[in-house]
Amino acid sequence: MKTTKSSISKLVVGCVLACCLSSVIPQARAIEDLKISVVVSNVVLSWPSAETESYIVQYRPSLTDTNGWQTLATDWPADSGTNLTFFVHTNAVQNPVGGGSYMAMASGGGLSSLSSATATLLPLMLLAIPTNGLGSAVPLALYPPGVDLSKFLIYDPVTDLLCSSAEYTASLSSRLQTTEAGLDGGFFPTPMENSSSTLAEPETGFYRVVRTGVHLVGITNGTVLSGTISLRFEFGNPDTNRSIDQVFLTDNDSDSTIPGSSFLNFTLNPLGSASGVWDTLQGTNGIYALQLGALLDDGSVATDTPITVTVSNVIYTPDPWNVGGVAIYGGFKTIFTNGDWHLDIYDDQDTYLGYLDGTIDADGYCNYPGIPGPGFSLDNTDGNGNQNPSTSYLMVMAARPETTPPSTHTSVTDKVFIEPAWNYYTRAVVCYEQIFQSWQPGADEVRLMVNAIWNVEEVFHQNRLGTFVMPYEIQGSNEWAVVTNSSNLGWVGVSDFFYFGHGSSTKLGSGAGLTLAAVQKLLANNFSDPLTATNRHPYRFVFLDGCNTADGDWPQAFGIPKKQGMSVADFTQKRGIRPRAFMGWNRKKVVGTGILSGGSLFPPHMEYIGKFWDWWGNGGSGGRNVSDAIDQAKQTAPNGALGMTLFGAEDLWINY
């Protein structure tokens, strides 16, 4: 038997259609090197695999819009003891070709989930099927002579007979003959009569196999990275009702994302692929255990297996927050331990302002003579203390070791955005969403907790909403409209915000609530717009007491860097701006066990919040650091502390 020209042409057309679809709709990134063969009326799929993985297997008769993907398996486990997994789609072939096996197509890489393979004949072979139903059918030839097959059923595709290994007799094998053309111990059919005749081509349709979970693609252990790289990833979820709200990249499951990494905020369907970026210059050189994570719309988190990589850049910025005020920070570091550097500076009109020269210290920092390092800050005032009008500055840093000529400088660029001067006293907004029914004990507990917070804030920063006996409650869209109007969150004088209630990485509150996008639009922070500066309305302190608020981009929306371990000096001395901090809960805080306790507020959570505000607000004239207040709260209520995350200045006082 042989293939016909028409069947090859049909396969090529199918490939073209798949590629066209990938340009207009999100495509799952299919398993590479997927092999598909036809055994009588059955389609046998095989693909490279790892034992820890599981897969979604899908099929569609054609690629027309009216034929969607049909799921054949939602969580198919990888075959154990091998790096190859098999799946059999039984009775799937129309016009089956008796006595032969037919290669139909293969799924390849890229966002196109299908690609064609040259149509070829494959020899028919016996299949071994596990009797316990776990795993899939595999060629019997994979098992060498003498292997115990008592836990398998043997399927003969020639006769379409299925029997136990004990019933496998010589009469069955007498119709088959051993051949040296295949695997050792394999059995293959004898040639068919009239093998040159033209038969109806088998119609198999299209298949794709996607790994379950979220996975980085194209980066493997041992990779050396530099500059800005693309972070391609795939997402497979057996639950078609779930989608991704947020994607993040951490270093070995850290509570904070890796500086310079970002992914667009969008909903990704249960089978899809997308990409982000990682500017490795915005961090330190060294070894990273990259762990991709995804926050799903139901609050659950999926994580990938860590991938160990090395970042190596000649020049980079270990303190990468590119925001300035009356000062501009140049924190460049190199791989050199000596030599010199040269810095050129341009304003937002690309006007050349001048240059600086200096030497590289033993730690690799580009320091300026007479200024304590690491790095240095530039004065951004007009000489009378007024901030210069430029909304951004471009810095071009070049460096070389002392043993090389000047012409061998290596250079990088860094753009610093300037936020407007902060000339207002701080005012506060304290509000909450009631998460209990009025008759439940938790309703009064929530009110009392938020009331105490209102009173602490009032001493230092006058509240715009609520009273000392009745804090402001959000019941729906009308109350959110009040919270966000130009007299409250939208007023330039408000820079403290506390909220208690339902939360996520992209929304506060139930129903429509307050979205991250709405806050970004309202405050115009973190847009890096050289025409308007980066932060139009930055906040001093924000505490979002809701689930997953530390997992999204809420800090940046309020003009606060999403970076841990910063100090007040990082804001005031380095950048000439007011210090700030953000508190929220990451994915480790679970509402069902960490906030609620039946009809009551989880006691450790209430104790934690109460201790934090009491200790932070009673520091006297000297003040107390926000990080110390967090530590005190943790000591008081350790069971309420899981998932607490602090970004920004750890030594921020409540009365700064």
Image (cartoon, rainbow, N blue to C red):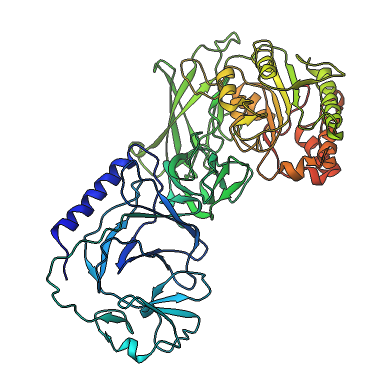
Of residue 387 and residue 254, the one placed in the foreground of this image is 254
Residue 331 x/y as whole percent: 54, 33
In terms of image quadrants, where is residue 246? top right
In terms of image quadrants, where is residue 437? top right
- Please say if 119 is above or below 401: below
Q: Which residue is rendered at x = 50% and y = 66% of the image?
A: 51
Residue 241 x/y as whole percent: 54, 43
Residue 250 x/y as whole percent: 57, 46
In terms of image quadrants, where is residue 209? bottom left
- Please say if 72 is above or below 550: below
- 616 left or right of 254 in image: right
Residue 456 x/y as whole percent: 84, 23
Of residue 283 and residue 130, the one placed in the foreground of this image is 130
Q: Which residue is rendered at x = 34% and y = 86% of the image?
A: 172
- 232 left or right of 300 in image: left
Please identify the quadrant where the N terminus is shown. bottom left
- 349 left or right of 520 in image: left
Please identify the quadrant where the C terminus is shown. top right
Say if residue 401 shows up in the picture.
no
Q: Which residue is rendered at x = 30% and y = 65% of the image?
A: 37
- Please say if 488 is above or below 414: above
